[in-house]
Image: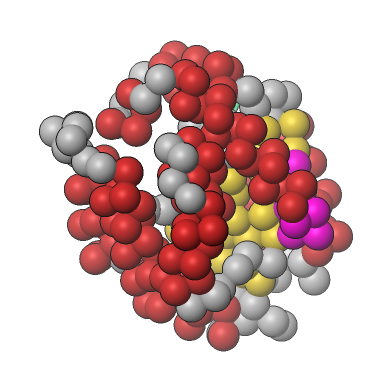
Amino acid sequence: MSGMFITLEGPDGCGKSTQINPLADYLRSKGRMVFTTREPGGTEISDQVRQIIMAMKNTSMHPRTELLLFLSARAQLVEEVIRPRLAAGEVIISDRYADSTLAYQGYGHGVDLDVIRRLLDFATGGLKPDLTLLLDVNADEGLRRRQSCGGEWNRLDAYQLEFHRRVQVGYHKLAALEPERWVTIDASQPSEMVQLLIRQVVDDRVV
Ligand SMILES: Nc1ncnc2c1ncn2[C@@H]1O[C@H](COP(=O)(O)OP(=O)(O)O)[C@@H](O)[C@H]1O
Ligand SMILES: [Mg+2]
């Protein structure tokens, strides 16, 4: 069986963490070897970079600094984990990947998109997902969910709602640019329904 790289994208609170393990279990029940990871992080080095990115005290971090930190964490994850496992025929499911950089640092912060694309290509060695699921909820709902669940509240959550709206618009544009790779799922529905829709998409694509 050939490896397959699936990414989950969408604003904070859209349900990526909720959906990833049930999806992995489903694919395992179909006989696939599945590995899940999340960004930034997923290796010892990448997790150290994650601490820097998320630290509340790093309020003065420039968007370019933030961008390069995300890319350095990703470069390590790709080489140490994703490529070897894909080569071994596994299904990799990542909670966020390169499209998050385009959505957040590009559309959100206004860093030049073509510059980001070139840097992404360098950082990942050109590795793109086979399938990207956009869990689509509006930014207000996503933030409301995150606040009401009392989960970890990090520096990135503290940006204004306007920023999150730009991110959401960015995601829609990215999905429209590569419709063969992206599938948009209405994630405002109950999570069981979202999982059913995800499984339908994956049934069509993963053998
Ligand atoms: N479809 C859904 N409807 C309502 N609440 C949801 C749904 N999916 C997830 N949640 C809740 O919203 C919060 C954020 O979900 P989470 O999976 O952590 O999102 P993400 O990982 O994308 O930031 C959690 O409290 C979760 O239980
Ligand atoms: Mg999450």
135 in relation to 51, above or below: above
For image coordinates 29% across by 56% down, the residue present is 69
Inspect this view and state whether residue 95 appears.
Answer: no
Asked whether 182 falls inside the magenta stretch, the response is: yes
What residue occupies the far right of the structure in this picture? 204
117 in relation to 22, above or below: below
Q: In which quadrant of the rendered image does the C terminus lie? A: bottom right
* Residue 150 x, y percent position in the rendering: 36, 19
Figure quadrant of residue 73: bottom left
Figure quadrant of residue 34: bottom right
Give the side of residue 77 with respect to residue 3, left or right: left
Which stretch is magenta? 178-184
Q: In which quadrant of the rendered image does the N terminus lie? A: bottom right
Give the side of residue 60 with respect to residue 130, left or right: left
For image coordinates 18% across by 35% down, the residue present is 60
Q: How many callouts does the rendering have?
A: 0
Asked whether 181 falls inside the magenta stretch, the response is: yes
* Residue 32 x, y percent position in the rendering: 67, 71
Inspect this view and state whether residue 146 appears.
Answer: yes
For image coordinates 14% across by 33% down, the residue present is 57
Q: In this figure, which colouring scheme has been used for the structure?
A: secondary structure
202 in relation to 129, above or below: above
Give the side of residue 190 with respect to residue 197, left or right: left
What residue occupies the far left of the structure in this picture? 57
131 in relation to 140, above or below: below
Please state which of residues 13 and 33 is positioned toward the viewer in this rendering: 13
For image coordinates 63% across by 60% down, the residue present is 6
Please state which of residues 129 and 64 is positioned toward the viewer in this rendering: 64
Give the side of residue 177 with respect to residue 110, left or right: right
* Residue 133 x, y percent position in the rendering: 68, 49
Please state which of residues 11 and 24 is positioned toward the viewer in this rendering: 11
* Residue 113 x, y percent position in the rendering: 53, 52
